[in-house]
Amino acid sequence: MMGLTKGKVNTTYVIGAIKTNQEDMRDFLFTLGCYPGEEVTIISKLAGNYIINIKDARYSIDESLANSIFV
């Protein structure tokens, strides 16, 4: 597995794990629908911000959140 930050733009990945020690960060990602087994697509990367697509919805997350998502 690799962190989402190492992923390529316009490529769909399956989330393998959410790895963070911060419970609030994990809860936030779960509210976005970001949990193991779900598909995520990186739409763009710009200045440490990532636009991702999960379940036909687009979200902007920062690099620390993207680093918590392993695909």
Image (tube, grey):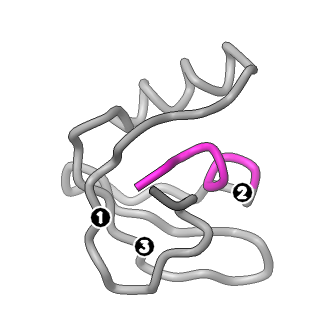
Which marked residue is nearer to the observer: mark 1 or mark 3?
Answer: 1
* Secondary structure state at the residue bearing disc 3: strand
Q: Which mark is residue 13?
A: 1
Q: How would you rate the neighbour count of disc 1 (Cα within 10 Å): few for under 14, some for 14-19, many for 20 or more?
A: some
- The residue shown at (60%, 68%) is 50
Residue 44 drawn at (x, y percent) = 51, 82
- Quadrant showing the N terminus: bottom left
Residue 4 drawn at (x, y percent) = 53, 62
Dot 3 and dot 2 residues touching (CB under 8 Å): no
Dot 1 and dot 3 residues touching (CB under 8 Å): yes
- The vertical placement of 30 against 55, above or below, is above
User: From this viewpoint, which residue is outermost toward the front?
Assistant: 1
Q: In the depicted view, which residue is nearer to us: 62 or 37?
A: 37
Dot 1 and dot 2 residues touching (CB under 8 Å): no
Give the side of residue 70 with respect to residue 13, left or right. Answer: right
Q: In the depicted view, which residue is nearer to us: 56 or 29?
A: 29
User: From this viewpoint, which residue is outermost toward the top?
Assistant: 23
- The vertical placement of 48 against 16, above or below, is below
Give the mark, 1 or 2, whose residue is nearer the N terminus.
1
Give the side of residue 25 with respect to residue 17, left or right. Answer: right
* Secondary structure state at the residue bearing disc 1: strand
Q: Which amino acid type corresponds to the residue marked 1 in the rendered image?
A: Tyr
The stretch of residues the image draws in magenta is 64-71
Q: What whole-number distance in Å separates the C-alpha atoms at marks 1 and 2?
A: 18 Å
- Which corner quadrant of the image does residue 12 belong to? bottom left
According to the picture, the residue beneath numbered tag 2 turns out to be: 62
Q: In the depicted view, which residue is nearer to us: 32 or 7?
A: 7
- The residue shown at (35%, 32%) is 35
Q: Which mark is residue 42?
A: 3
Which marked residue is nearer to the observer: mark 1 or mark 2?
Answer: 1
Q: Which amino acid type corresponds to the residue marked 3 in the rendered image?
A: Ile
